[in-house]
Image (cartoon, helix red, strand yellow):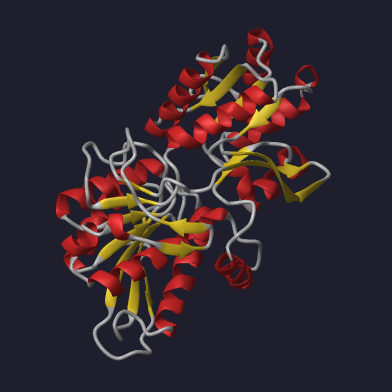
């Protein structure tokens, strides 16, 4: 399979314990997110190995590039299952993670999803899949509350065809409608970025949310709106988190500041998180995003399960409820959440933040939930 990377830590004796890793490392996947996710996964695996491995056995990450392709992810899960991995980890894109989760469920391989938030990761409730980030319904409702609190009740969403974007639009519309707000959809498969400006004026929207891919068409949409004097007071938002990574700031410069997005970090990292932050910064050559912490926490949880309950797949899948791991962003445990088909870390932190217009390299916390 193209894009194969295998990360092995062979310093200990015995057959390695293998974890299959799914990450977007090539386009059209969000490569920078994949790089941060993998950095966190690999750092944690290295530390597991340095502290005795899994009952004396080395931990091996068998990495596959999903390239944001659900079919490629499904094929990777099938391959990794045949290779005998004890569990699966990773993935950033929700639609891709859904494909991987469905395959993991069907094949009986435990999968800890690192970053994807789509509520329905599987069609039916399953014990084979657990997730670290909050479900989309929780995070995006918190984002809607932020919008209302900031005085925005007439919201336009620039959107593209996708299960993920459609789910986000529905969450926003339902939550805002209960509180007197409205959502107007702008179909970016039919509109040019410049036409968005006229639509915003016509609809009298005070906020535009980018429910679209990055860099296209997100970057030209932002540039068009920022340059239109009629829209000087319109808030641009990106709940899916595009402004978190440096690529956003590089593409947009000052135009990329002041765009609120969802980030899954607490106000203060745990002591472990502070140490991991320094190590990730050195590894990445830049400040780690929340995605890198999600990667680290994923391996921390799986290593605890493997050390405590062994490498049997069914044993791992039957032990999500017993997880109690100190992660980089708080104590991690899993439970059943209404409307969510997988085991869920229910207390995962949620923030609404933006890049400070006065200093775009600095993030401002605007709202927490």
When asked about the image quadrant of residue 8, the answer is bottom left
Residue 126 visible (yes or no): yes
What residue is drawn where x is 39% and y is 53%?
Answer: 91
What residue is drawn where x is 59% and y is 51%?
Answer: 266
Residue 230 appears left or right of 125: right
Q: Which image quarter holds the C terminus?
A: top right
Q: Which image quarter holds the N terminus?
A: bottom left
Of residue 326 and residue 196, the one placed in the foreground of this image is 326
Q: Is residue 319 above or below residue 17?
A: above
Q: Is residue 98 above or below residue 311?
A: above
Image coords of residue 19 (percent x, y): 31, 68
Of residue 158 and residue 134, the one placed in the foreground of this image is 134
What residue is drawn where x is 45% and y is 43%?
Answer: 134
Q: In the displayed orientation, state which residue is furthest to the top.
A: 202
Q: Is residue 122 above or below residue 154?
A: below
Residue 35 appears left or right of 112: right
Residue 182 appears left or right of 57: right
When asked about the image quadrant of residue 324, the answer is bottom left
The count of marks equals: 0
Image coords of residue 196 (percent x, y): 63, 20
Residue 13 appears left or right of 81: right
What residue is drawn where x is 60% and y is 19%?
Answer: 155
Image coords of residue 78 (percent x, y): 20, 57
Image coords of residue 83 (percent x, y): 20, 69
Residue 25 visible (yes or no): no
């Amino acid at each position: 399979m193209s894009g194969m990377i295998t990360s092995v830590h062979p310093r200990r004796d015995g057959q390695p314990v293998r974890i299959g890793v799914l990450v977007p490392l090539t386009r059209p996947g969000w490569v920078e997110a994949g790089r941060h996710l993998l950095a966190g996964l690999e750092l944690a695996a290295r530390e597991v190995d340095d502290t005795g491995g899994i009952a004396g056995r080395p931990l091996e990450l068998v990495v596959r590039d999903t390239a944001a392709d659900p079919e490629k992810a499904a094929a990777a899960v099938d391959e990794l299952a045949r290779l005998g991995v004890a569990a699966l980890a990773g993935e950033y894109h929700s639609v891709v993670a859904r494909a991987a989760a469905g395959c993991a469920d069907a094949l009986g391989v435990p999968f800890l999803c690192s970053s994807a938030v789509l509520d329905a990761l599987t069609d039916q409730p399953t014990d084979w899949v657990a997730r670290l980030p909050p479900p989309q319904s929780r995070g995006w409702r918190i984002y809607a509350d932020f919008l209302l609190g900031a005085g925005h009740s007439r919201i336009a969403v620039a959107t593209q065809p996708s299960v993920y974007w459609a789910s986000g639009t529905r969450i926003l519309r339902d939550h805002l409608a209960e509180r007197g707000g409205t959502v107007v959809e702008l179909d970016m498969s039919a509109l040019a970025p410049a036409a968005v400006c006229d639509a915003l004026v016509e609809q009298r929207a005070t906020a535009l949310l980018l429910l679209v891919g990055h860099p296209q068409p997100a970057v030209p949409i932002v540039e068009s709106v920022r340059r239109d004097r009629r829209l000087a007071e319109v808030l641009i938002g990106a709940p899916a988190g595009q402004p978190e990574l440096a690529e956003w700031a590089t593409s947009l410069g000052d135009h990329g500041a002041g765009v609120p997005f969802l980030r899954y970090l607490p106000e203060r990292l745990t002591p472990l998180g502070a140490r991991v932050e320094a190590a990730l910064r050195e590894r990445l050559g830049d400040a780690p995003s929340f995605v890198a912490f999600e990667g680290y926490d994923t391996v921390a949880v799986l290593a605890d399960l493997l050390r405590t309950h062994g490498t049997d797949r069914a044993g791992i899948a039957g032990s999500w409820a017993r997880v109690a791991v100190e992660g980089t962003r708080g104590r991690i445990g899993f439970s059943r959440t209404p409307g969510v088909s997988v085991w869920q870390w229910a207390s995962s932190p949620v923030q609404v933040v933006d890049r400070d217009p006065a200093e775009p390299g600095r993030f401002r916390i605007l709202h927490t939930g």
